[in-house]
Image: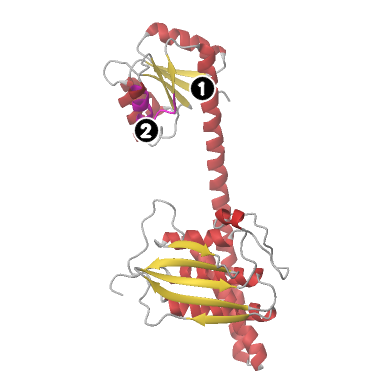
Amino acid sequence: MPATILIVDDTPANLSVLVDTLSEAGYKLMVAEDGEDALAQTARTQPDLVLLDVMMPGLDGFETCRRLKAQAVTRDVPVIFMTALTDTTEKVRAFNAGAVDYITKPIQHEEALARIGTHLTIRRLQQELKQQLALKERFMRIAGHDLRNPLCLILMSGELARRKGATPAVAEYLESIHGSAQQMRRIIDTFLNLRKPGDEARSPMDRADLNLVAAAVVTQNEPAAERKQLVLGVELGDDLPLAKADAGSTYQALSNYLSNAIKFHAPGGRIVVRTRLAGAFLRAEVQDQGPGIAAAERPALFTEYARLSARPTGGEDSTGLGLSIVKQLVEADGGKVGADFPAEGGAVFWFELPVAPGA
């Protein structure tokens, strides 16, 4: 389907030449002789691109462009200015108004067609990406919603098994299954309720006890550590105030850090989970004796699907998403993430969360 271009120019001769050139190139055309007419037409029909003259009676090109960008239906439509002005200040003014490019008069038609083609391609790719992301988001939310039902069955079955009575060893495993299923449900609920950019901030009532979270995370991960002959240590800060954060998200973030440390650690050794006060922030750390991260790869930490040379040591799966999830969760609560690499080896992955007001 051919793209639709709106030409806005008050000079009939310019319009005639542009209409002939663009029609021959196979584009569908809309024509407006002033800014008001352009705004009225775009309210009814959305073009794929706008060619906009700068000097027009009434609304000039700059104001017309600003109004196009203020309308939801035309906010993302690329605007190319047509201008005889060559002053840098005027060009900057055009970009500040929202234009993506400009064509200098007298118009060179081959250049105009090339610029138009480039920006239409960019717009098409942006629209395709937006559709793909929307489809992926919809699929993930449906999947997350549907996974809650079998998880609830696992939780209920585990609870019934615990009530029937079991040996201490079996009871410990049932407790681990129960805790893991609960954490999976928390992760799904967090995803389904995760804020998007522009959403309102979390409720001011959100509070997290970092020491309780750390203790629970260690308990939850002890079976995995035991399988790799790893000792988990806990060093909790004294009398820590509450963090201004969602407790479930904080648990998920710290659990990701600890499970990563266990996953990439060779059998044997010690991993320490630590909490402390760091100025106006509460800090949680996971320190390991693992291989660390190569200096060249450190900038890629906390990015999705980061390709790092370190590999799980016990055949565990690794999606490359854990650290990016930590970053998203912590930053959503106004915190920050990072990693340090001591000279003696290993790594310290940390995040900081703001102290709750009045805590």
Left or right of 39: which side holds 234? right
What number is the disc on residue 284?
Answer: none
**What is the residue that sits farthest to the top in this orientation?**
13
Question: As rendered, which of 316 and 31 lies closer to the eye?
Answer: 316
Question: Where residue 26 appears, x then y in whole percent?
Answer: 57, 17
- Which residue sits at x=37%, y=33%? 69
- Which residue sits at x=62%, y=59%? 294
Answer with the quarter of the image where residue 68 lies: top left
Q: Give the range drawn in magenta.
A: 90-101
In the depicted structure, whether residue 71 falls above or below residue 315: above
What number is the disc on residue 69?
Answer: 2
**Amino acid type of the residue that numbered disc 2 sits on in the rendered structure:** Lys
Q: Give the mark nearest the N terminus, 2 or 1.
A: 2
Residue 142 seen anywhere in this rendered image of the structure: yes
In the depicted structure, whether residue 38 falls above or below residue 166: above
Quarter of the image where the N terminus is located: top right
Task: Give the alpha-carbon distance from disc 2 to disc 1, as whole Å.
Answer: 18 Å
- Which residue sits at x=48%, y=27%? 48
Label 1's element? helix
Question: Where residue 15 appears, x then y in whole percent?
Answer: 42, 10
Q: How crowded is mark 2: few (under 14 residues within 10 Å), some or many (20 or more)?
A: some
Find out whether the residues at labels 2 and 1 contact each other: C-beta distance under 8 Å. no
Q: Main secondary structure of the magenta part?
A: helix
**What is the residue that sits farthest to the right in this orientation?**
315
